[in-house]
Image (cartoon, rainbow, N blue to C red):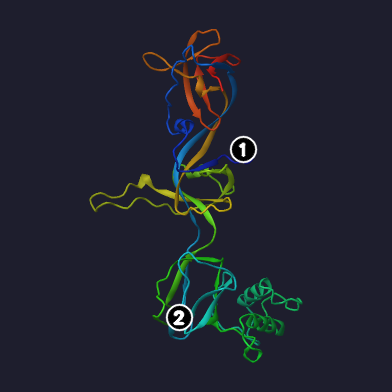
Amino acid sequence: MSPRRGAVAVVAIAVTAPLAAGVAYAARSEPKAAATPTAEISTGTATVRRGTLTQTTQLSGTLQYTGSYTVDYQGDPGMLTAAPSPGAVIARGDVLFRVSDAPVRLLLGAVPAFRDFSYGMSDGPDVRQLETNLSALGFDPHHRMTVDRHFSAATAAAIRRWEASWGRPSYQRTGRLDQAQVVFLPTAIRVTALPARVGAAVAPGVTVLTGTSTNRAVVAQVDTAQVAALHVNDEVEVSLPDAGPIPGRVTAIGRVATAPSAESPDQPGDPNAATVPVTVTVRLPRGFALDRAPVTVDVIVGTRPNVLLAPIAALLARPGGGYQVRLPGGGLVPVEPGRFDQSTGQVEIVSGLTEGQSVEVPAA
């Protein structure tokens, strides 16, 4: 895994699954040394060299849909006559729900619908937002509408084309939109819950449905002592079950730390256990459908340059404790290991070896 130039932290993420033996090394400060090879085991050699050792820490996280959105009804009182099922995806221009059979459609934008849209209305950012949607939906085929803050005759004509797509006869096409006919959200929505049931009475301000975006990301809870090593746009590598590694990057680092809730008034939460949410975006393989999947996040929080490195596999248990390595001639040499770098399978050698020496390792 190659870190982005200038970035101190790189993140490797793996969906929780039975871990390979090598990953187990990274989860321990001192991994168990390999047993002394017997005469029947085929061996090779590796050269002790100087290089850069990375330091990793392991976090927990979840692969989940991002964002949280609430859709309220803003029209006249009526009955909820149609609503999507949880899991349904509503895109730009689609019907969110129906009240007394009148559809409420989704448009994309950050400004909520706060007034009706019609010719002669005052200029505003909501008009630009509406015109952006009409253009994206293809209802200005001759490009006569200027996407700006002004509601023009071309804007009304684009709305009439939209109305025609609903099946309205020409005499019912008004070229205007009531506030209750559209809902603006920043993104397409994936429905998660329906607080209001079909058949129930709804009034202005009633929440009809809630949802998320259609994008999935990894959200990891990072200890406040470790978060300084992470930066937005740090490159990441994500390993998924039954799939090769895929790229990703850190896109958001929370600014508010949360601590575990107190179990009781006599046992307050530990302020030293406070964490900050870190979001990592990924492009998942086609057909990958897991949601709320637990993940393990291996974070490289620092580097140690110009240290002696030897393969972790060269370490052998030493009688009485400690470690040793076997030289090509058969002799055993005690060594003092430092930190371990599972990403490359290397261990820092503090003492016992010199640069350029060869050590025995199990044959590949």
Say which element carries label 2. strand
Q: Are marks 2 and 1 in contact (CB under 8 Å)?
A: no
Q: Amino acid at mark 1?
A: Ser
Residue at point 42%, 31% (across, down): 28
> Horizontal placement of 209 versus 4: left or right?
left
Q: Amino acid at mark 2?
A: Thr
How far apart, in angstroms, are the residues tagged by discs 2 and 1?
54 Å
Of marks 2 and 1, the one in the foreground:
2
Q: Label 2, on which residue?
A: 81
Residue at point 55%, 46% (across, down): 231
Image quarter of the C terminus: top right
Q: Label 1, on which residue?
A: 2
Say few, some or many: other residues with alpha carbon within 10 Å of mark 2 (under 14 / 14 to 19 / 20 or more): some
Looking at the image, is 56 positioned above or below residue 256?
A: above
Question: From where the camera sits, is residue 257 visible?
Answer: yes
Give x and y (percent) for residue 179.
54, 82
Give x and y (percent) for residue 319.
38, 13
Residue lying farthest to the front in this orientation:
40
Image quarter of the N terminus: top right
